Image (spheres, rainbow, N blue to C red):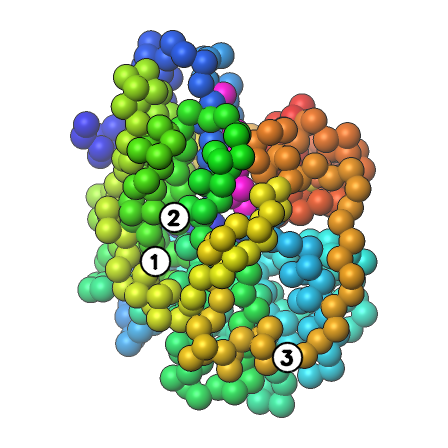
Amino acid sequence: MKYIDEYRDRELVSRLVSEIQKVSRKDIALMEVCGGHTMAIQKFGIPFLLPPTIHLLSGPGCPVCVSSRKYIDQAIAYSRLDDVIITTFGDLIRVPGSTSSFEKEIAAGADVRIVFSILDALKIATENPENRVVFLGIGFETTAPGSAAGVLNAAKQGLTNFFLFSSHKIMQPAMEALIDEGVKIDGYIAPGHVSTITGTGIYKDIPAKFGLGCVITGFEPVDLLHSILMLTRQVEDNKPEVAIQYKRAVKPEGNLKAKKMLDEVFDLRDDWWRGLGILKKSGLVLREKYSRFDAEKMIDVEVEETREDKGCICGEILKGLKKPGDCKLFAKACTPSDPFGACMVSNEGACHAYYKYNRDG
Amino acid sequence: MCLSIPAKVISIEGELARVSVGGTEYEASIQMVEDVNIGDYILLHTGFAIQKISAEDAEETLKLFKEFEELNVRLDEEEKESGNRIV
Ligand code: SF4
């Protein structure tokens, strides 16, 4: 299939839609595991273009949503230390912790700065030698190489007041855990930007082990529909495989340089995911060699007891078992301006995306 | 956070590049990608170029963004009207 030509045809969306209608016979559920896909699918109203046989589910693709409340509580505890400057992406500012949030801590005088990149955090550390600067590292394989680069640069510059607080996770253990738990799906709309780094390798066992196809997908309507068509064909022909739809950005081998940096800086550890619990070797921790940059090891702090909110069904939503509209609080007690759970705070959260584009849930 | 956008490389100094996304310029580290040249398109993610995109493909992606701009404008207006604007 000629990839580029497809993009030139404005009518392509409707052509793809009718092709999908033609091919689809079985009732199938496809899961996307990337917050960017969650947003794009709702924004472009993709579910409404599909025949009733094809169901789309959101999985654990929003990094802020799957991270533990304890992580937020600990980051907030750091922010309360007099000499600590917290640097973070904007997504985390309004995530509720057990009793507070960064928004509240900022109002109370904490020095919390929103940065565009970890490199800005390094600058802040250089300019403020009296302070300890903590960067909140959150995200999957797309974001983690940036943190690795940040740590490598900090080492090169000889910084002693820069620390990474890692909540970085890798995608593949969660994709397998979901199926192990019995969540019923027929194929993965595999994450485009995670795959930019990892390549196809992380998905290679999924077709053989679970009989599920994985199609690495871009973020435009044509990408999404094209990939849904590819997956539908795989299911109808009973030939699950790993394929790349998002060819303009994903190479089968991924980004080798970024992978090397990840491996140099991080080791795997067991990590907790909202909805899935502890998954073996699913989180990234700084290697011994770089532990002087590890906030968890270098900064002592007392963290309050974690309190989870009652009523939030984020965990079920992240497994594709429920939809935001199934939550009693959705669009009532829980809205983006007054979020109750993490899935409503983050732009990439399913509740946020549904609230913004598909209010009926 | 998972969002990455195609950006055009305008200038390069060592490991840093200035890149443009629809006319707005950003600084991007290119330490993660090999062989980046002025005029190339890269995928920009949290201040890093995470992969190179071929120029043709990037243009096509941008063209698509334009085509769906209308839809965006309409959705934005609806949000404003309903008072549920979320930025
Ligand atoms: S609507 Fe709010 S409370 Fe309900 S699941 Fe989503 S984030 Fe949690």
Residue picked out by circle 2? A193
Q: Are marks 2 and 1 in contact (CB under 8 Å)?
A: yes
> In the rendered view, would you say A298 is above or below A118?
below
Q: Residue at x 42, y 83 (%)?
A: A155
**In the image, B11: left or right of A108?**
left
Q: Is residue B64 left or right of residue A3?
A: right
Per the rendered image, the range of residues in magenta is A55-62
Ligand 1 shows up in which quadrant of the image? top right
Q: Position of residue A353 (x, y in %)?
A: 59, 36
Question: Would you say the beta carbon of the disc 3 residue lies within 8 angstroms of ligand 1?
Answer: no
Q: Is mark 2 within 8 Å of ligand 1?
A: no
Element marked by disc 2 = helix
Mark 1 neighbour class, 10 Å CA radius: few under 14, some 14 to 19, many 20 or more: many
- Asked if both marks, 2 and 3, belong to the same chain, the answer given is yes
| Badge 1 and badge 3 in a common chain | no
- The quarter holding residue B75 reads top right
Pair 2/3: label in front: 3
Quadrant in the picture for the N terminus of chain A:
top left
